[in-house]
Image (cartoon, helix red, strand yellow):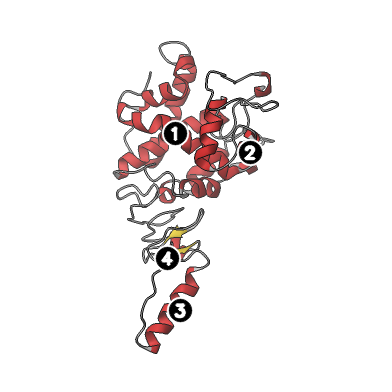
Amino acid sequence: MANSPVAVFTFVVLGLAAALLSAAGPAAAQNCGCQSGFCCSKYGYCGTTAEYCGDGCRSGPCTGSGSGSGSGSGTGSGGVGSIVTDAFFNGIKSQAGSGCAGTNFYTRQAFLNAAGSGKYSEFASGSSDAAKREIAAFFAHVTHETGHFCYIEEINGASHNYCDPSFTQWPCKSGATYYGRGPLQITWNYNYGAAGQSIGFDGLNNPQKVSQDNVVAFKTALWYWMTNVHGVLPQGFGATTRAINGAVECDGKNTAQMNARVGYYKDYCRQLGVDPGGNLTC
C-alpha cells in the first residue's frame, strides 16, 4: 500500500520520520498491508523483528500480546503466534517417530507465515476461548492426518486415483496425481484446483508443490479449513470431523479413528487452558 505524501515542517520531525521508515524495513507502509511473513506493528509498520511481531502486533505472524484485528488475532488472544507457541508446536512434532519426512518440513514459522498471509483473517478470530478452541481443533486434525507432523504425503497415495471428471472446472491433468498432501492431506482435483487458484499456484498441473513448499502446504490446509470446516465450529468438534472425513469415520463407521481426533482435541484444549465444549463426536 503506497503512502500519501506527508508534509514535514521541521528538521526534527523529518529526521524522526526517516528513522521510522528506515526501521520499518522493505515492506514498510503506514497502516500496514504487509507482504507475506511480515508483522504489522502497533504503530502501523511492517517488519519481522520483536518490535513488529511482539506487543501490540496487529496482523501477520504475531508473537506478542497484540490486540489487533488482523489475521487470526482473536479478541484478546494476542494473535495466533501467542497461542501456537514453540512449546505447543514442537510438543506435537516431538511425538513423531525418527526418520519422519515431515520433521524438518513442518515448522512453526511456516505455519505463522501462512496464517499471517492476509487470506485467513477469520481463522482463530473472536473471543480468546473461541480462538483457542479453533486452534486446538485445527491441530487435532493435523496431528491425526500427519501422524504428529511425520507425513508430508498420504501413505501409498500414488496408488489412488483422486480424479473426479464431473468437476469440469478443474480438469485432471495427464500425469498429475491428486492424492493427500500437506497438514490436512488435501485430495481430489477439485480441491487442488480451487486451493491453487486461491493461494496462487498451479494446483492442477503442479499438485506436488504442496509437498515441496511448507508455507504453501499450510496455506492449503488453512484454505480447506476456512472453506469447509470453520463455519461448523459452533456445532462442536464432532462437526469438524464430519466436515473433514465424515464419510469414513462418522455415524459408527470408524469410531477408533474418530475418537483419536477427539483425544487430540481435548489434550490441546487442556494445554491451552480452554474448555473443549460439547458435541465432540460425530
Residue topped by disc 4: 45
> First in sequence: mark 3 or mark 2?
3
Counting other residues with Cα less than 10 Å from the Cα at mark 3, is it few (<14), some (14-19), or many (20 or more)? few
User: Can I make out residue 211 in this image?
Assistant: yes
> First in sequence: mark 3 or mark 1?
3
**Label 1 close to label 2 by CB (< 8 Å):** no
Q: Secondary structure at mark 4?
A: loop
Residue topped by disc 2: 209
Q: Which disc is residue 18 wearing?
A: 3
Closer to the observer: label 3 or label 1?
3
Badge 4 amino acid? Tyr
Closer to the observer: label 1 or label 2?
2
Badge 3 amino acid? Ala
Quadrant containing the C terminus is top left
At 31% across and 45% down in the image, what residue appears?
A: 128
The answer to whether 94 appears left or right of 232 in the picture is right
Residue topped by disc 1: 225
Q: Position of residue 162 (x, y in %)?
A: 60, 21
The answer to whether 198 appears left or right of 129 in the picture is right
